[in-house]
Amino acid sequence: MAVPVSTLPRRRQPRLSPLLAAFVLVPFAIESVWVFWPALQGFWFSFTRWDGMTPPRFVGVDNYTELAGDPTFRGALLNTVIWLLLFGGLSVAGGFGMALLLQRDRRGVGFYRAALFTPVVFSLVVTALVWRVFYQPDGLADTILRGVGLEHLIRPWLADPDTALYAVILPALWRQIGYVMVLYLAGLKAIDPALHEAARVDGASAWQRLWKVTVPQLKGVNAVVLSVIVIDSLRSFDIVWSLTRGGPYHSSELLSTYMYSTAFQGLRLGYASAIAVVIFLLALAVILGYLVRAFREEENA
Amino acid sequence: MTRALRTGAFHTGMVLLSVLWLAPVLWVVVMSTRTFDDIAAHGVGSLPHSFTLDTYRQAWTDGGELQALVNSLLVTVPSVVLSLMLAAVAAFALSRYRIPGRRTILLLMLAGNLLPPQILLIPVAKFSELTGLYDTLYALIAVQVGFGLGFYTFVLYGFMRDLPREIQEAAMIDGAGPGQIFGRIILPLTRPALAALGALSFTWIFNDLLWAITVLRTDDKMPVTPALLGLQGQFVSSWSVIAAGTVIAAVPTVAVFLRFQKHFVSGLAIGAVK
C-alpha cells in the first residue's frame, strides 16, 4: 500500500497530475513496445510458418505436432531437465554449504568469500573462454590428469558427445555457486541470533540447530533461490553457445540454443517461436509463484 | 587444542578451495603474456617460458577490442542511466500516490522481466528491422531498457514505499508538487538502492550476449562480449591473444565490482531477505 496517501483523509489526496501519469505511462509504454507486444507476437508466430522474408502463414498447431516428433527437440528438452537438476541442485548445495561455512565474520573469511564470488562478475563468454583453455587438448585438465597418472581418462572434453554437456555445466556452476552463496549469506544474516541462543540453551546440537532453526528460517530465501535457479536454467544460453553451440551432434543442446539456431540460422521463425513458447510454459509455474509472493508481500506491507 | 585444530583445518581447506576457484582465472592472465611460439612449443597446459605484452596490442587493435569496448560503453552507460531514471519515476508514482490499478501495473511490469527472453527474440529482431533500428546500438539500448525496467521498478518501489510518509506530507503542506517531492526528497533518499541497482545493471548489460547478437549483425558494432566470440574465430590458435582479449573484456566489470563492492553485493541480496 502507498503509505502516505492511504492514511490521509480523502479530500487531501492530490489529484492525479499529468506529471504523475507520465511518470507511470512512459516507462510502461516503453516496456509494452519492447516486451509485452513482442511477447504476444511470439505466441502468434508459433502458429505460423515463416521464413522471415515472405509474410507468415497460419498453420494452426502444426509446429507443435512437429515438435512432438522432433528427436533434437526431445534431446534438448532432456538436456534442459538435466541442466536444471545438476546445475540447480549442485549450485544450491554448494552455495548453501559455503554460506554456512563462511557466515561468521572471522579472519580470512572476507578473502574466501571474495574468491568464490569473483567469477560472478565475469560474463558467461569470459567464463567460457577461461574454461576452454582448461579443456583444450593438452590443456590444464589433461596436464593435471597426466600428472596424477589418469591419462587414460583424457578425451576431447567439449568435442565428445558423452562429456560435452557436463563439460559445459561445470563452468556454469563455477560462476553460479558464488551467487547463490551471497543470497544465502544475506538470508543467514537476517536470522535473529536469539533463536540460536535459545536453542543452544535448550541443549540443541549444532546439527539440530541447522535443521530446526536455520533451515526453517530460510524459507523466504529458498523461494527466491529456487525461482532464480529455474529461470536462470531455462535462460542459459551464453555459456553453451560460447563453448559448443549445442554440439557435437546436439549433445549439449538446450531448448534455448535450439531455439536460437532454429530461428537465426535455420530461419524457421514459426517453429522457433513454438520452442520459445515451450520454454515459456516451463517457466510459467515459477514466474507465477514469484508474482504471487510479490503480491502477498505487497498486501502485508 | 581441538579448537585450534579445527580452525587450522578450516583455513587450510578454504585457502585450497579459494586457490582452486581462482586458478582458472590466474592461468588465463598468465597465458595472456606468453608468446605464440612458447604456446606452440609447450602447449596451453604448460607453465610460461616467455613474457610479452604484444598479445594485448594485437587483441586491442588487430582484434578490434578497442572498438568493441567503446561500443560496450556506448550501450551500457545510456542503458543503465535511462532504465534507472525511468524505473525511479515509475516506482515513485506507484509507491507514493494512489494511482488507479497500480498494483496490477507493478506486477505486470515485473512479469515482463521474468519472461524468458527467447519468446521475445524473433519479434524484437523483426520490430527493430521494421523501425530501421536493426543493426544499430539504439536498438540494443532500447531493448535493454525495456527488458530491465520491470525489475528495477519493482525493487525501487519496495524501497520507496518504506520511506517515512511524514517527509512527503511536510513538503505537500509547503505546496511542493510531485516533481519537487520526487527530485528533492525521495530521489536523494533512494540513493543506496540506486547505487546497488546501478552496479548490478552495469554488469548485466555489459556482459550481455543474447540481445546483442539478436539485434546487431555488423562486426564493428558488436560490444565486447559478442566481440570476444569473434576474436576466437579470428585468432583460432593464438591462445595468448584470445587470453589477452578475455582479460580486457573482464576488466571493466571487475573494476565496477571492486569500486562498488558493498553496493554490488547488497544489490544481489535484495529480495533474498524479504
Image (spheres, rainbow, N blue to C red):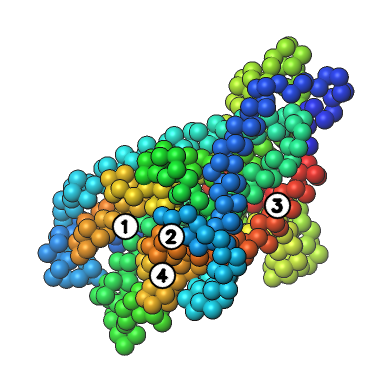
Question: Are discs 4 and 1 both within one chain?
Answer: no
Q: Chain of mark 2?
A: A
Give x and y (percent) for residue A188.
65, 55
Kind of residue indicated by mark 4: Gly
Pointer 1 residue: B229
Is residue B227 depicted above or below B155 in this figure? below
* Residue at the image position 59 percent from the left and 57 percent from the top: A43
Q: Is residue A47 visible?
A: yes
Pointer 3 residue: A291
Kindly report the distance in space between the C-alpha atoms of the residues bearing marks 2 and 1: 26 Å
Q: Which mark lies nearer to you, 4 or 2?
A: 2
Element type where label 3 sits in the image = helix
Kindly report the distance in space between the C-alpha atoms of the residues bearing marks 3 and 2: 35 Å
Question: Are discs 4 and 2 both within one chain?
Answer: yes
Kind of residue indicated by mark 3: Leu
Give x and y (percent) for residue B237.
20, 65
Element type where label 4 sits in the image = loop
Left or right side of A133 for B269: right
Q: Kindly indicate the quadrant of the structure image that contains residue B2.
A: bottom right
Is residue A68 depicted above or below B56 in this figure? below
Mark closer to the chain start, 3 or 2: 2
Left or right side of B62 for A282: right
Pointer 4 residue: A246
Q: Which mark lies nearer to you, 3 or 2?
A: 2
Q: Are marks 1 and 3 in contact (CB under 8 Å)?
A: no
* Residue at the image position 55 percent from the left and 49 percent from the top: A38
Q: Are marks 3 and 4 in contact (CB under 8 Å)?
A: no
Q: Are marks 4 and 2 in contact (CB under 8 Å)?
A: no
Pointer 2 residue: A51
